[in-house]
Amino acid sequence: MKLIIYTDGGARGNPGPSGLGVVIYNQDKQILGKYSKFLNRATNNQAEYQALILGLEKAKSLKAAEVDCYLDSKLIVEQINGKYKVKNPGLGPLFIRVWNLSQSFKKVNFYHIPREKNQEADKLVNEVMDQHQH
């Protein structure tokens, strides 16, 4: 079974209050699940990684064999695809978690997409951050 995952993360303040959004589709483009989570204090990049980790964990629990992941963070995609080094010490452990989770699948691809193609996940991020603003 192949799943398609859209993930997004964001922070207000960078670092600051942050959140993540994940939307998982099957091959027929039907939504299997939408997930969002408030992360308290994180950077944009940490939130992006946390979103991807949650997406991969959900895909693993759904017993996916193949996963296509779509993110609007060029940095994260390039790091995972080995084009950029992970220099930030706060991202190293998150990168390793993504790498380890990606070993659970026969095939996993990471693609960079423009933000306007990631509206569903982006909306979840903003909703969860709005809910936690005082």
Image (cartoon, rainbow, N blue to C red):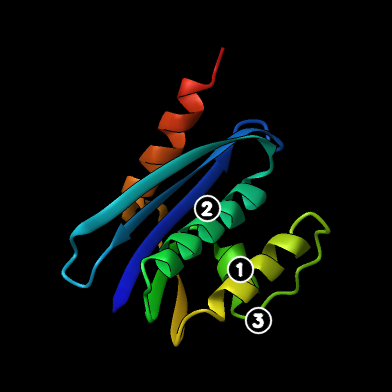
Query: Alpha-carbon distance for marks 2 and 3?
Result: 19 Å
What secondary structure is found at the residue carrying circle 1? helix
* Residue contact between numbered discs 3 and 1, judged by CB atoms under 8 Å: no
Question: Mark 3 or mark 1, which has the lower sequence index?
Answer: 3
Instruction: Kindly identify the residue that appears in the image at 54 percent across and 18 percent down.
Output: 133
- Residue identifier under label 1: 98
Type of amino acid at the residue the image marks with label 1: Val
- Give coordinates of residue 6: x percent, y percent: 38, 59
Q: Residues within 10 Å of mark 1 (few under 14, many from 20)?
A: some
What secondary structure is found at the residue carrying circle 3? loop
What secondary structure is found at the residue carrying circle 2? helix
Q: Residue furthest top?
A: 134
Q: Which quadrant of the rendered structure holds the C terminus?
A: top right
3 vs 1, front mark:
1
Image quadrant assignment for residue 14: top right
Q: Residues within 10 Å of mark 3 (few under 14, many from 20)?
A: few
Residue 82's mark? 3
Identify which residue, 120 or 100, lies in the foreground.
100
- Residue identifier under label 2: 51
Q: Which quadrant of the rendered structure holds the N terminus?
A: bottom left
Image quadrant assignment for residue 107: bottom left
Number of numbered labels in the structure image: 3
Question: Mark 1 or mark 2, which has the lower sequence index?
Answer: 2
Instruction: Kindly identify the residue that appears in the image at 50 percent across and 39 percent down.
Output: 37
Left or right position of 61 against 96: left
